Image (cartoon, rainbow, N blue to C red):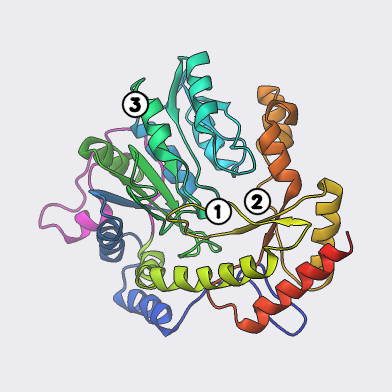
Amino acid sequence: MSPTATEDFVPFFRPSFSDAEEGAVLRVLRSGWLTTGKEALAFEEEFARFVSSPHALAVNSASSGLMLAMEALGVGPGKKVLTTPYTFVSTATAAIHLGAEVVYADVEPGGYNIDPARVAEALERDPSIAAVVPVHIAGNPCRMREILEIARARSIPVIEDAAHAFPARTPDGFAGTLADAGVFSFYATKTITTGEGGMITCRDDGVAARIKVLRSHGIDRTVWDRYTSKQASWVYDVVDAGWKCNLPDILAAIGREQLKKADGFLERRARVVRAYNEAFSGLPFLTLPPDSPGNAWHLYLARIRRGKDARDRFAKTLQDGGIGISVHFIPHFEMSYFRKRYGISRSDFPEAARSYEATVTLPLWPDMGDRDVERVIDAVRKAGSAL
């Protein structure tokens, strides 16, 4: 858990828990059943109902969820996955773990999400690409209508990396439910959390069935079914070489309580965002984050207009002043592994490079009080005035 706010420090993030989550954990502990069981099943059903998806499949992380969704939609050795360099590493390494390779497309000018025009160019240039993985950075939905039209014209599946995007209600439905599959994260800093965990949504019954098998060692019966069924509990078959990716009931029980609060959490984050936007809109050194209908406001990405050195000085001044900050994300072309594997550099992705070099992520969490918000605003103004 992140540290709490004090007179000397405003954390970058702090999860919001109450007696409800504590009671849910105790309920599971007292039940005697700790692994994946009825709580995880209930969480899946409740999440699927929330986002209006035919299937929701709980997993132990969004990283494993991406790998499972990719595999179920045909990604494997000899295939390529198109995504953005402006994302966490697992968007790419999920494909690499499956024996596939990654192709990158730059982000939108002045933004963070993958540019549909660059997606179209990449698919035209390389017909061997087998899947497209757009990432809804900071909870701001990608231009999915355009991306889906481009991919479907070539019969290429689309997997939404919706790790930041719950609950992002777009005019077309929830981000994460618009494509062939979507993957959400419940990591400790996400909009709802189970500590670690994730959820895969999909429409196709066959894709869902394959994910269910693969997430639990390729076994054709769940452990909960073997425990509760009248049939012999020790009888099962291994039908494929799967992984260990299931979500335990303790974490699922926390997720069920967090899900009930998701809309309230979003409303409270949006309140902080409105205060930030009002305070920062006239500042000459800062550009407000991009926004679009349905933004889940997972992160507040402030852009400093005066170059990377100014951004770094600005970030250090905030940290020295007791404001917890981060930078989302360090693009893949800045990481030695991806540079060596793919021979990429910042010159290949000028928009992603510009966004990275300008961005500082400010504190944003549901329980931020007015005093916390004012301290961040004051610190931003002071740090900017010194640039």
Instruction: Left or right? Give the position of 265 relative to 173.
Output: right
What separation in Å lies between label 3 and label 2 (alpha carbons)? 30 Å
Residue at the extreme front: 282
269 or 70: which is nearer to us? 269
Magenta span main SS: loop
Q: Reading the chain from its start, which is encountered first: label 3 or label 2?
A: 3
Residue linked to disc 1: 138
Provide the residue designation for mark 2. 328
Q: Which mark is residue 79?
A: none
The crowding category of the residue bearing disc 3, from other C-alpha atoms within 10 Å (few below 14, some 14 to 19, many at least 20), is few
Residue at the image point whose x is 38% and y is 57% from the top:
247
Badge 1 local density, few (<14 within 10 Å), some, or many (20+)?
many
Residue 74, x across and y down, in percent: 36, 26
The kind of secondary structure element at disc 1 is helix
Q: Is residue 33 above or below residue 387?
A: below
Image quadrant for the C terminus?
A: bottom right
Nearest to N terminus: mark 2 or mark 1? 1
For badge 1, the amino acid type reads Ala
Residue under pointer 3: 152
